Amino acid sequence: MISGGALEFGSNNSNISSGRSESGVNSKLSALNVSGNTGGLFAGGSGSGSLGSGPGSGSLGTSTAEPGGTLASGSLHPLHFNWVFWFMHRSPGSKILNYESSMKKIATFGSVEDFWAVYSHLKRPHELPTVSDYHLFKQGVRPVWEDATNINGGKWIVRLKKGLASRYWENLIVAVVGDQFDVGSEICGAVLSIRGGEDILSLWNQSAQEGRINLKIRDTMKRVLNLPVDTIMEYKTHNDALRDNSSYKNTDIFR
């Protein structure tokens, strides 16, 4: 399911409709730990090669490459969860009266191949206008503080210099959908906020009081993003965000 204004058709990314012949199919599967032993990536499988159909597989009708680069139907690699891309943009200085209704659902996917099919057609973060947000959340979890899955949780925050968002965003969402955080269902989603002087990554989890798990998420985020050792990370609970009506102010600092 695809809709919305953050899609980019034509140019060098128009490779979904007729089958992707790029060597990127295999390399992108590899980026999600799909080569060799699949580990715990897929629903219902541990790398034995019996992947099953999985939840939501085939939502875009793409699959792995056959010899010669054409796409074979019915050989998708299901993810543990279905995921939804969302997009929001507002003019700088304008107010949003209803945050949730301002977000546009872009696409839903449930397999490795469908993830890359959608992602290859999205505008990269450096191409987005100022005050834009990408959200990637589990299907059924609304990307708002008040959602029942989010309300008792919070988010880890990393502030980026301009020009770095595209690389870090891709690394983060590949790690998220690929279950590299290894914390079960604790991860709710990820957000990228494009702003005037900086860009901001945030990773949402559902239990703000689970200190050990929160630190594991922080450390894994540092690792998958290959952050410098002196990177300042911040955490903010969604209850605090509701109290001060702010996503990125009054955060707890972790050095």
Image: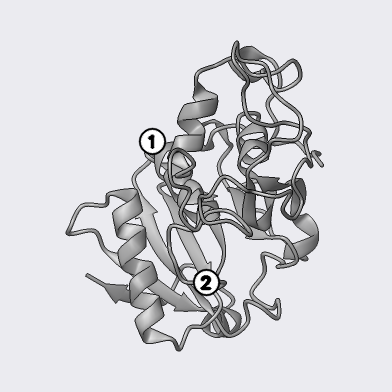
Amino acid type, residue under disc 2 in the picture:
Gly
Q: Helix or strand or loop: what does disc 2 sit on?
A: loop
Spatial CA span between label 2 and label 1: 32 Å
Q: Are marks 2 and 1 in contact (CB under 8 Å)?
A: no
Q: Which mark is residue 184?
A: 2
Q: Nearer the viewer, residue 115 or 191?
A: 115
Image quadrant containing the N terminus: top right
Q: Nearer the viewer, residue 67 or 25?
A: 67
Q: Which mark is residue 85?
A: none
Left or right relative to 145: residue 101 = right
Q: Position of residue 241 (x, y in %)?
A: 55, 78
Q: Residues within 10 Å of mark 2 (few under 14, many from 20)?
A: few
Q: Is residue 90 visible?
A: no
Q: Position of residue 54 (x, y in %)?
A: 72, 53
**Residue that badge 1 annotates:** 163
Left or right relative to 71: residue 200 = left
Q: Residues within 10 Å of mark 1 (few under 14, many from 20)?
A: few
Mark earlier in primary sequence (2, 1): 1
The residue sitting at 72% across, 31% down in the picture is 62
The residue sitting at 55% across, 26% down in the picture is 25
Q: Position of residue 69 (x, y in %)?
A: 61, 15
Q: Is residue 210 visible?
A: yes
The residue sitting at 66% across, 45% down in the picture is 111
Amino acid type, residue under disc 1 in the picture:
Gly
Q: Position of residue 67 (x, y in %)?
A: 59, 15
Image quadrant containing the C terminus: bottom left
